[in-house]
Image: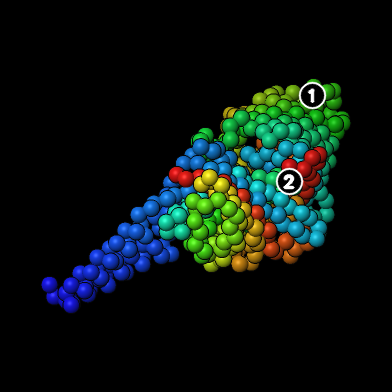
Amino acid sequence: MLKRFVILNFLILVLASAALAPVLFYNVNSGSISFRSDAPMELIKASSSQLKGIFDAAKKQFAFSVNIRTFSGFNSPLQLEHFNENYLESDKYPRAVFEGKIIEDIDFNKDGLYYIRAKGNLTVHGVVQERIIKCELDIKDKVVSVKSNFTVLLAEHNITIPKVVHEKLASEIKVEVKAVMKEK
Amino acid sequence: MNPKTILSISVFMLIFLSRSVGQDTTDIMKQLEKEMGKSEKEQTFYTTSTFKTTRLVSGHSVENTGKRVMDVKISHRFEKLNEGSYSLFGLDEARMRFGFDYGITDNLMAGFGRSTYQKTYDVFMKLRILRQSRGKKNMPFTLSYVPTFALRTLRVNVPGISNDFTSCASYTHQLIIGRKFSDNTSLQIMPSYVHRHLITLNTDPDDVFAIGIGGRQKLTRRISLNAEYYYQVTRHQLAGTNNLLSIGFDLETGGHVFQLHFTNSQAMNESNFIAGTSGKWGKGDILFGFNISRVFTLGKKH
């Protein structure tokens, strides 16, 4: 009886160390995030090249973030101002974050194209939403290129649009993320 | 060893193990936090929207018009409220100014306007010398310089007063030091100097120094309460003039900013409202007024 428990604990220890041992971190080397609002009367585009992120291959965990103030583009300086002041309230909620875990198991040592799902919490405008976001990973010589397209519903993140701009601002924003990740 | 103890150790280890490979992203978030902090320190974030528009009420705010943006401003100042119901509390008549402001660069704007008050034309420039920012470049406040030239074209038939160019011209130089303290609160001080050639009395000064103070408090995301006050420091101020005090609201809707206010001056150009305000709040010489601002983005899109 006692022996069995000792063996069990030993096994757990081995398992634990195996799971934790290959600490392999990937860091975003260059990352960009862009979004577009395609409304009947106006198309608004903006982007930031200041996307940061970390991926822990052993735990399959990731965390990405961008500072809202780094977005540029827009159709006018006033639009940028309203984006920061009225919609995203970037002084109050300076960053957008997506953190979670990859569902699929993939071998990062093997080159190839992988389609995976990232499950986690997306925080925009201070509101957290659980999301599963599809990503395309292109692995080549341990360099991981991440590409992803998804949408953000403004209403889900408590971003309200006044009636007068309904025709100029889409309620669903298309987001594109591109990042090149390298071993840390 | 007691099997129970061993079992509890096993359970504890299992929990520990499942935690470490589970959803908990605390460690990785801490790392990312550090990285974000580092990258944010390497960039300069300029403070924006210290005020909703380039005017507080009648005077300039520390805000500039964006590059290649034209701001068309239409302003009205009605008559005094204490005129009573016969003239609908001053609403029967109004002084009007229309003006065009344009952002030449992000830090330099220029504008001109024409006011029915003494048929005055005015031109100005606003140069932002320092800009409030944080991050790589840390600047606690914004500093702007605003020179204004105004020309009265109303001909007066008063003996001793000439209607020639130099007599009708006035010059104002202002420094504006402003700071956005929080999302909702911004304050600014405006040391100002007004020079005029036209003086009616011998005791009237050519030069008037004034200190202005103004600010805004946001009430909702799109409405703010504004106030401005100009205190004439000069010992000899123009006979019969008072300090300017204006209180108003900014209402923002898309590309428009509506400013509704109460003030004791009918004038909408610096030299007249800083050094030539005749109304007195205490006596009820308060008048209602409004500015409408509409911005147009000219040239290439950003």
Label 2 CA crowd tier, 10 Å (few <14, some 14–19, many 20+):
many
Q: CA distance from mark 2 to mark 1?
A: 42 Å
Judging depth in this view, the residue of B168 and A88 nearest the camera is A88
Q: How is the image coloured?
A: rainbow
Judging depth in this view, the residue of B297 and A154 nearest the camera is A154
Q: Position of residue B83 (x, y in %)?
A: 76, 54
Instruction: Name the amino acid, label 2.
Output: Ser
Instruction: Name the amino acid, label 1.
Output: Ser
Q: Secondary structure at mark 2?
A: loop
Judging depth in this view, the residue of A17 and B280 nearest the camera is A17
Left or right position of B102 against B31: right
Q: Which residue is mark 1?
A: B167
Judging depth in this view, the residue of A96 and A181 nearest the camera is A181
Q: Which residue is mark 2?
A: A76
Looking at the image, which residue is at 49% across and 56% down?
A107
Chain letter of disc 1 in the image: B
Which quarter of the rendering shows the N terminus of chain B? bottom left
